[in-house]
Amino acid sequence: MTERFVLSRQIEFNHCDPAGMVFYPRYFEMISATVERFLADEIDYGWTTMGASTGGFGTPMGQIDVRFSNPSYLGEWLDFSLVIKRLGRASATFEITCSGDGKTRFVCNATIVHAETGGGKSQPWPDAARTRMTRFLDASEDPEMRTPA
Amino acid sequence: MTERFVLSRQIEFNHCDPAGMVFYPRYFEMISATVERFLADEIDYGWTTMGASTGGFGTPMGQIDVRFSNPSYLGEWLDFSLVIKRLGRASATFEITCSGDGKTRFVCNATIVHAETGGGKSQPWPDAARTRMTRFLDASEDPEMRTPA
Amino acid sequence: MTERFVLSRQIEFNHCDPAGMVFYPRYFEMISATVERFLADEIDYGWTTMGASTGGFGTPMGQIDVRFSNPSYLGEWLDFSLVIKRLGRASATFEITCSGDGKTRFVCNATIVHAETGGGKSQPWPDAARTRMTRFLDASEDPEMRTPA
Amino acid sequence: MTERFVLSRQIEFNHCDPAGMVFYPRYFEMISATVERFLADEIDYGWTTMGASTGGFGTPMGQIDVRFSNPSYLGEWLDFSLVIKRLGRASATFEITCSGDGKTRFVCNATIVHAETGGGKSQPWPDAARTRMTRFLDASEDPEMRTPA
């Protein structure tokens, strides 16, 4: 059965815009944090381990799309729930659903590439990381979905 | 002939991540700034005018997708070039291309909705704003493209 | 005895700069979050309650100073520990110490003013909020310390 | 005569909080950008040149204090005006005044340290950089002012 990774976050003043709602670029920081904690805490292959800051491997974003359905407000707790829709040789496509209080706020599809830092070449996932990631692979994945790498 | 709106920005330290490249959530702030200046400076219907902060109308993001092709580095100057791919009754889909030094960094499609603030109902664009926006409507628009509202 | 309010945060990729350390403006977002949670969770007079977003009262920053002593790195857990050094009629001066792994990262003094939103006049703290705040008043406060309002 | 370095910036939606004013942590990004452009454009010793991202020298913030006097709003143009109050062997204390429309928004004093990246030792400014910086040294500097390094 597919596991899901869930990060919970409370909406802070610094996330909100003058209209009193979450400013959508802040969601991308939360999406990044969801991927960050997933790789570090569940896959045991986080950005520190892979050397994203120090010249090793990183996971640059290849493509991302988000459909927003409901606004979010100051003080709300949101869940960012991640499954893998496609696990490529050197890439992974996540579906991240953000919801709170029973309402979906957005659904995001994001494809990261496992690559040498500094804009370098893509490289296959290490075996141990790949094996751990398969637990989060959603069986209902769309076989038509295409991703880079 | 279709006009383009171009915002130029220099990449600063605060945009860059530990891998030394632009951290992709920062691009969404730049995308937001591109739409902000376009609406205010070209369409004369900016967020202050429409009352986004004070309880009037705003332009929440309905859907956004970005394909990244090349990384960007500290000190580089980038152009964010906007055309309108679809102009709906109460929405607009922008294509924003980010490039610098002859290389595309990303292509973004973003659909904003003209709506009452506070998560309110969508409302038609004012006539004057719509008229000005048509100058930026790209004739090569894909007729199949669907957007909310 | 003086109570302390402590917020714990893990350093994320989005907090770090190309030198691989926390980019200091991000600390101010964490300082803001510390004050935000303190007012909401301990004083029961948070920004939502006082109407900071909706036209009521807010707590604009009057003055802030920070002395940095050690850098912070990706993945570290930091504690932001708050006491009140001075409780004015319509203001409060916090001392927020940030530390992790036994090392101080910075010490911050920050004076907020309780005021009408929109740049309005300062107003006395409500009695209930003031009473709760006194539990966090540090007895060793420097009597010479001056703050606005 | 003392020269001033001035950076002008327009306040964007992403800088503003739910109270409709600039969220003060965003000012620290602008302060950082002011120092960044000053060092790169006036002193010809910017963060790229000194190797802040790549393992050379950087200018971590040692101490910063800001006194806020007036709020800033969406769309306003602000000037960030920098002079040097003290030029140490391996440090520099800037006074950065932010104003717009004839009103001061804040006055900031910030001391950076010229040091090896990665939390390394402070190192004297290169001679050429020091010479260029003296043009911005404010003669009215307070001789009692003490800074680290």
Image (spheres, coloured by chain):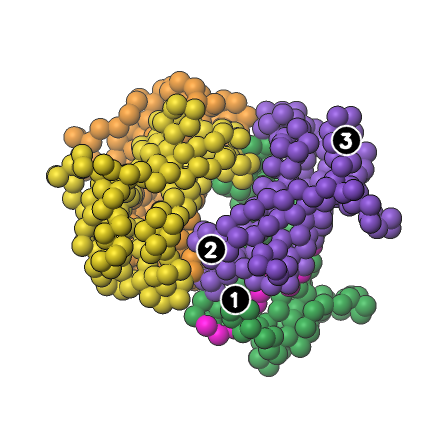
Chain colours: A yellow, B orange, C purple, D green
Residue found 34% across the figure and 54% down from its top: A44
Instruction: For residue A143, say whether it is visible.
Output: yes
Residue farthest toward the left in the current orientation of the protein: A144
Element assignment for label 2: loop
Extent of the magenta region: D55-69
Q: Mark 2 points at which residue?
A: C75
Q: Return the chain for callout 3.
A: C
Residue under disc 3 on the same chain as residue under disc 2: yes
Residue in the image at 59% along x and 44% along y = C7
In the rendered view, tell whether residue A59 sits above or below residue C133.
below
Location of the C terminus of chain C by quadrant is top right
- The quadrant of the image that shows the N terminus of chain C is top right
Distance from disc 3 to disc 2, alpha carbons, whole Å, reads 36 Å
**Three-letter amino acid code at disc 3?**
Arg
Measured Cα–Cα span from mark 1 to mark 3: 49 Å
Q: Is residue D74 something one can see in this rendering?
A: no
Outermost bottom residue = D127
Left-right relation of A111 to A20: left
**Residue in the foreground of this view, choosing between C81 and B76:** C81
Q: Residue C130 carries which label?
A: 3
Query: In the displayed structure, would residue C85 be above or below residue B53?
Result: below
